[in-house]
Amino acid sequence: MNTIFRKSVLGVAGLAFAGGLAAGPLNHHDTTPTTTALTPVVAVQADKPAVDTAKLIPHGVQGAQSTITLNDEQVGNAKAIIAATKKAGMPERAAVISIATSLQESKLENLGHLGDRNDHDSLGLFQQRPSSGWGTPEQITDPEYSTTAFLKGLKQVDGWQDMPLTQAAQTVQVSAYPDAYAQWEQQAADLVAQHWNS
C-alpha cells in the first residue's frame, strides 16, 4: 500500500511539474516579444564567423597578466578602437595591440589634461602628445582619430605582425616603461574576440 501511495504521489507531482513547465510560458503575457527577440539574435550570431584566437595572440602572452573591470565608457572605447582598426583595413592583431596599449596608457579612458598629474601634455586613450606631433588636443581626444594615428605609426613598424605585443607597442609609443604593455595582452584579446564581429 505504501509503494502504491508513493507512486501515485510521484505521478501527480510529475504531472504538476510538467504541466507547470508547459503552462508557464503559455500564461506569460510577454511570450511573443521574447520569442521574436531571440530569433534574430540566433540568426545573426550564426552568420558571424568566429575570431581566430591564434591570430589574436600568436606568440602567447608574456609575463603575468593584469585585468580590470570595465565600465560602459571603457567598453565603448574598446569598440571604437576595433571599429577604427577595421576601417583602417588592419587585422584583429592590430586591434589587440591597440587596446593593450590603451589599457596601459589610460585604462581605456579618454583622458583630458590632468594638470600636475599629467605626463607632459599627454591626452586621450593612447596618451598622445600634441607637442610631439600626434595632433591637436581635440583630435587626440577623439577615439577614432587617436586610434588611426596609433595604427598609422604601427604600420610604419617593419614586421609588427611578427613582434611580441610589447615590442610593437613600444616602437610606436616610445614609453619609459616598454615592458608594461605585455600585461594587458589577454584582456585586449578577449575584448577583440568579444566585439570584433558585433
Image (spheres, grey):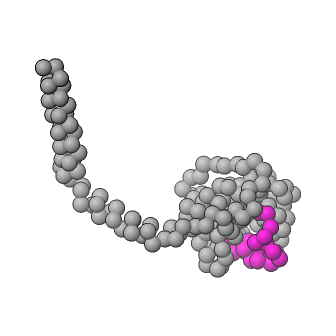
Looking at the image, the residue that sits furthest to the top is 2
Q: How many tags in the picture? A: 0
Q: Is residue 2 above or below residue 23?
A: above
Instruction: Identify which residue, 47 or 175, lies in the foreground.
Output: 47
Instruction: Estimate the x, y position of residue 177 in percent, counting from the top left.
Output: 84, 55
Q: Position of residue 179 (x, y in %)?
A: 83, 56
Magenta part mainly helix, strand or loop? helix
Of the 4 image quadrants, the one containing the N terminus is top left
Left or right of 63 in this view: 41 = left
Q: Which residues are magenta?
A: 144-165
Residue at (17%, 23%) from the top-left corner?
A: 3
Is 128 part of what is drawn in magenta? Answer: no
- Residue 132 left/right relative to 9: right
Asked whether the viewer can see residue 144, the reply is no
**Can you give x and y, in whole percent of width and height, for residue 152 in the image?**
74, 77
> Who is closer to the viewer here, 183 or 81?
183
Location of residue 36 by image quarter: bottom left
Residue 188 pos. (x, y %): 66, 59
- Residue 183 in view here: yes
Residue at (34% x, 61% y) in the render? 38
Magenta stretch contains residue 160: yes
Depicted 38 relative to depicted 24: above or below: below
Question: Where, by quadrant of the figure, is residue 150 drawn?
Answer: bottom right
Residue 195, quarter of the rendered image:
bottom right
Above or below for 147 versus 193:
below
Most extreme residue toward the right is 176
Front-most of 196 and 111?
196
Position of 102 with respect to 6 (left or right) is right
Q: Residue at x 19, y 52 (%)?
A: 26
Q: Which residue is depicted at the point 72% across and 64% down?
A: 58
Q: Is residue 80 above or below residue 117?
A: below
